[in-house]
Image: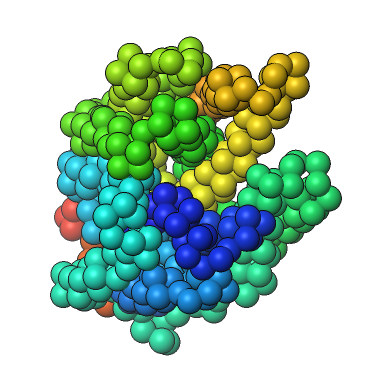
Amino acid sequence: MIVLDITIVNIALPSAQRDLGISDADRQWVITAYTLAFGGLLLLGGRLGDLFGRKRVFTIGLLGFALASALGGAAVDPTMLFGARALQGAFGALLAPSALGLLSTTFSDPKERSTAFGIFGAIAGGGAAIGFIAGGLLTEYLNWRWCLFVNAPIAVATAFAAFSVLQRDHVAKGNRVRLDLPGALLGCGGLLAIVFGTSEAVTRGWVDGLVLGSLLLGVALLAVFVLVERRSAHPLLPVHIVADRNRGGGALSVGLAMVGMFGLFLFLTYYLQAIKHFSPIVSGLSFLPMTAAIVISSTGIAARLMTRVPSRNLIAPGLLLAGAGMAWLTQMKVDSPWAGMVLPAELLLGFGMGLVFMPAMSLATLGVAPNEAGAASATINSAQQVGGSFGTALLNTIAASATATFLATRIASDPAVRAQGAVHGYVVATWVAMGILLLAALVAFVMIDHRPETGGATAVEGGPEEAAAVAGVRAVDGRPSPRAAAMADVKANVRAGDAVRTEAGAERPPAD
């Protein structure tokens, strides 16, 4: 629902603009209001789940998302729609890290974990494409408002299911740590500034003062954020989470992959509707092969291999496969057939990204103590959001610039020439997207060195408390019991090769 909502409104935007009288200058805020709130508040949303219990935060996020969606669907003027979209993004920032955190703490068995993350990765990867289909169907046969209304019954039903199905993980008031307010202001402020700058770059250009100022401010705030977090007793984002090469490499790889993928969705939508003259519904349906490829690759291949092969042997080849799909699209022409040009590229991209999403999502929370799972989940979600926002702005600017250069020396009034210019811009941007995917593959191959081991999916960093929290008994507040901590300490010494003495003083060989 969260990923779908980023794209479904794109299809409904022209109808909403006409209905509410939104100006061309302000229409971008239907998208920007959502991405700003969502991307800017992810770190805070993830930490709130750690402090107050992910089940509670997840349920609140669902109900809030339903309310915000209903308000947006009932909007009577642009301001009401913009505000509802910002509320959607804010509650989405509670939902996304809580969902991934719940998945990580619920499934600790390696085989169960691989299956669960395979399904999760398939849904995350296919959500954007499904948004185009749902948006086309709802807009054409009902009304643009249903692109927002449709979330309400889904969210409410899921909230009731969550209340009855999910295990209670409420953290008692006396056991909660203080919220890192300076870190929240700096981290969320930095992400807000970066997402805002990249969103504005679509219309203003990268050399605009507001865009450059926002990007520089965001980088500066995040730099100060890192310094503050190093000295904080209870940091919003513990530095060791992103300092780990596997989690850092996974997040960076996914962020770079999103730069290329979000730009691709934008270009293919325009190519199919503006150049090939497909209807919104047919355009949406044309993305189905990519969605199917992601599902098959993620659940049928990656989930089976995650416990058998090193993670980088899935992520790096997956990114190379997606890069091959981009390379195929660089041959796109105005009269290229969908079956011969777009379909093969979609299949390559889908199979490739299916190998990336699931192991990267699993690495994001692998080895993290339960009381930090939300912060770790928020990290990779932030990488996705910032990467998608930055990629849309970057590739859109490159495509527009290439099209303008192409038309400058030709008869721009000719519709056929304008179509050629638009496709030329898409091709140039696709070359850049391919290069970014190849860079992501290199990053994954160099940085990620995780290898599956027996029980590896539940390996936890830190001392016995963290190990016990995953492998042993948890108290109601999410903390390990003393017995579980003691048992974990014994097992840690045994695995380290220390001999274990019996009561009689005789030595026994180390054993698990």
113, 15: nearer the viewer: 15
Q: Nearer the viewer, residue 106 or 135?
A: 135
Q: Quadrant of the N terminus?
A: bottom left
Name the residue nearer the viewer: 219 or 322.
322
Residue 295 visible in image: yes
Snapshot quadrant of residue 155: bottom left
- Quadrant (top left, top right, bottom left, bottom right) of the C terminus: top left
The x and y percentages for residue 188 are 61, 64
Colour option used: rainbow
Tell me where residue 419 appears, x and y as whole percent.
55, 24
Name the spot of residue 220 as percent of width and height, x first. Answer: 76, 54
Is 190 in front, or is 292?
Answer: 292
Q: Is residue 388 above or below residue 235?
A: above
Instruction: State the count of labels.
Output: 0
Q: Is residue 463 left or right of residue 413?
A: left
Residue visible at 75% across and 54% down in the picture: 214
Can residue 36 be seen here? The reply is no
Residue that appears at 62% across and 22% down? 414
- Residue at the location (17% across, 46% down)? 112
**Residue 231 image point, x, y percent:** 67, 64
Rendered residue at 47%/61% (across/down) = 16
Res. 5 image quadrant: bottom left
